[in-house]
Every structure is written in structure tokens, then in C-alpha cells.
Amino acid sequence: MRPQWTYALLALTAFFTSASCLGAVSSFSTGTGQPLAFLSDLRSENTRSLSDVQNAVEKLQMDDHPGVSPSETERLEFLTKREKNLRSRQIFLNRLILQFDLKFKGGDVQSFLKTALHEMAEVDGSPFLTQLEASVSALPPGQVDVLKFVEGYMKRCSFENPMRADEYLSSLDYYNGVQAQKAHGMSPVEAAE
């Protein structure tokens, strides 16, 4: 049986999905639809992941019997933490989509995103939002697909214990907007060859 808040979250998600779809239609005509479409796709992917994890948790809880093995208990703890992180991610994506839908009028996505993240962090004091804002602010303007960057940060860092901006950025020696790779040092002689 799902807790009552799960149904409220699903209803809220359905509301934001329909609201952002309507906003996305009007935004496409002004050139602002790309961020909304990208974020909506991320939210849909997150919704599927959240549903899968909730189903796995329910199955484990239904299979609960007196002789639960330590591995099942560990799996339940892992899934519960994952579910909590996915719920936080869903709320974040809903809020970010709302920011883009209501306030983004086209132009520089990175500049808008810095401002939006700052405002969101001020409202709830989330360390995740604060570190994400610092990471986005440290990016060179116009050289990175900032929405893909946000996706990478969101998927790599938990909402409860986010990675510091400098730590995250230093882990991304090479970032092409889709994936990051660690640099491997070489001597000047090797580089010259």
C-alpha cells in the first residue's frame, strides 16, 4: 500500500506535466521551448525510475516475513534511499520547469539558470541547490550545454549530501555536454609527441 503523500506527489506531477506541456507549446513559438522540452524529458525519465523503485520497495515489503535475510534488508534500505532521492529530484525538476515556463523569455539559458537556482536556493536553503548554483556559475559562459551539465550533477549527486561545486567541477576534466572523463597527466615530452 502506498503512503498518502505518494498519491499527492503523483497528482502534483500530473498537474505539472499538463501545465508544462501547455507552456511548452506557447514557448516553442518564442524560441524558449528547448529548455522546457529537455527538462520535461528528464522529469519523465525520473518518473519512470521513481515508479520502478516504488514497485521494487512494495514487492520487498510484501515479501516481508520473519526470516528476512540481511541482503534483503540492505536492498530495502538502498531502495528506500534511492526513492527519497528520486522524489527530491522530481520536486526539483517540477520547480525548475515552473521557473522556465513562467520566467524564461528566451536568450541565455546559463544566465537565466544561475538566477533561477539562486532564487530557488534562497527560498528553501537547500545545500543541493546552493552547490548546483555555484557549479553553474563557475562554468565558462556559452561553452557548455548547461542543461546537460545540470542533468549530470543531478544524477551524480544526492540531494541529501551534494558534492561541493569545486569538487564536482574538478572531477570533470573533460566534459562534452553529455559525459565527463578524467584527464590523465603526461609529461611535456609525451605531449610533444
Image (spheres, grey):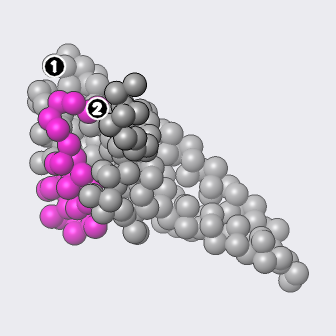
Residue 54 visible from this viewpoint:
yes
Q: Which element type, helix, strand or loop, lies under badge 1? A: loop
Q: Is residue 134 left or right of residue 48?
A: left
x%, y% of residue 126? 27, 67
- Label the magenta part by its dominant secondary structure: helix
Residue 192 x/y as whole percent: 34, 27
User: Toward the viewer: 120 or 102?
Assistant: 120
Depth check, front residue: 10 or 161: 161
The region drawn magenta spans 116-145
Q: Secondary structure at mark 2?
A: loop
User: Quarter-wise, where is residue 16 in the image?
Assistant: top left
Q: Where 156 falls versus 22 (above or below)?
A: below
Most extreme residue toward the bottom is: 66
State the residue at coordinates (17%, 38%): 140
Residue at screen point 37% across, 64% down: 162
- What is the CA distance from the residue labelled 2 to the residue labelled 1? 20 Å
**Quadrant placement of the C terminus:** top left
Within 10 Å of the Cα at label 2, are there few (<14), some (14-19), or many (20+) other Cα atoms?
some
Q: Judge whether 16 appears above or below 189 on screen.
A: below
Q: Which residue is mark 1?
A: 30
Q: Position of residue 29 (x, y in %)?
A: 20, 16
Quadrant showing the N terminus: bottom right
**Hey, which residue is sitting farthest front in the picture?**
189
